[in-house]
Image (cartoon, rainbow, N blue to C red):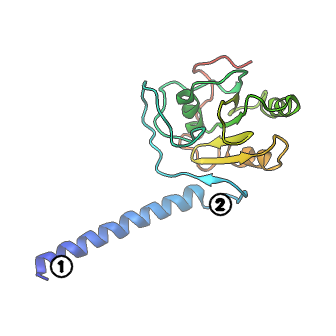
Amino acid sequence: MSKRSLKIAVIAAGGILIAGGNDAAYARVTHGDEPYIPGVRTFHNLSRRHTTSHITYPQVPPVGGPHAPLLLNCGVYLTPVRQENAVHSLEHGAVWVTYQPDLPADQVATLRALVRGRSHLLLSPFPDLPAPVVASAWGRQLRLDSAFDPRLKRFISVYREGPQTPERGAPCSGGVGHPS
């Protein structure tokens, strides 16, 4: 290997180590004290780009990625909401609780009581949901078999304006939508 090739290889390796170290340090600072909740799935490298286009998200419901320029006002919705606006609310620290439209009425009432009147929480039915109830925050998701699962309250406690929030402190109002 020539001196020039060796120098380029050393510089490239150094750059990779520095970038990796920066990523690790960022993860430690932003997520290092995140408590463990069984079943929480984590997603990384989510775009924060604004777009007016319809997005097909890889997660159902979405946990981040390109989203509408206007957020969805937090609160309780009786019908499905536009995902792109809800994702913007996640960027501001909201937890979006979704449920299958045929969820028993007592469970829907429990979810409404949990969300109503609290900042940075969204609730809406979601057709074709992969579980009866799904809680989503920016880069985090928890699938639940019931609204009575105690992990739901823990998820909300940890991730509502939590350490994963890109724009912590930003409002969850002043956007679109009219919660009930």
* Residue 137 rendering spot, x and y as whole percentages: 63, 42
Residue at screen point 52% across, 24% down: 70
Residue farthest bottom in this picture: 1
Q: Quadrant of the C terminus?
A: top right
* Residue 72 rendering spot, x and y as whole percentages: 60, 25
Q: As displayed, is residue 170 above or below residue 33? A: above
* Residue 31 rendering spot, x and y as whole percentages: 59, 57
Q: Quadrant of the N terminus?
A: bottom left
* 8 relative to 176 in the view: left or right: left
Residue type at mark 2 is Asp
Q: CA distance from mark 1 to mark 2?
A: 40 Å
Q: Nearer the viewer, residue 150 or 35?
A: 150
* Residue 16 rendering spot, x and y as whole percentages: 33, 67
Name the image quarter holding residue 36: bottom right
Mark in the foreground, 1 or 2: 1
Residue type at mark 1 is Leu
Q: Residues within 10 Å of mark 2 (few under 14, many from 20)?
A: few
Q: Nearer the viewer, residue 1 or 32?
A: 1
Residue farthest right in this picture: 106
Q: Nearer the viewer, residue 32 or 155?
A: 155
Residue at screen point 66% across, 30% down: 127
Name the image quarter holding residue 61: top right
Residue at screen point 65% across, 42% down: 136
Q: Nearer the viewer, residue 58 or 5?
A: 58
Task: Give the residue number, with chain letter if any, for mark 2.
Answer: 33
Residue at screen point 43% across, 67% down: 21
Task: Give the residue number, with chain letter if any, for mark 1.
Answer: 6
Q: As displayed, is residue 104 above or below residue 147? A: above
Label 1: which secondary element? helix
Q: As displayed, is residue 35 above or below residue 102? A: below
Mark 1 and 2 residues: CB-CB less than 8 Å, in contact? no
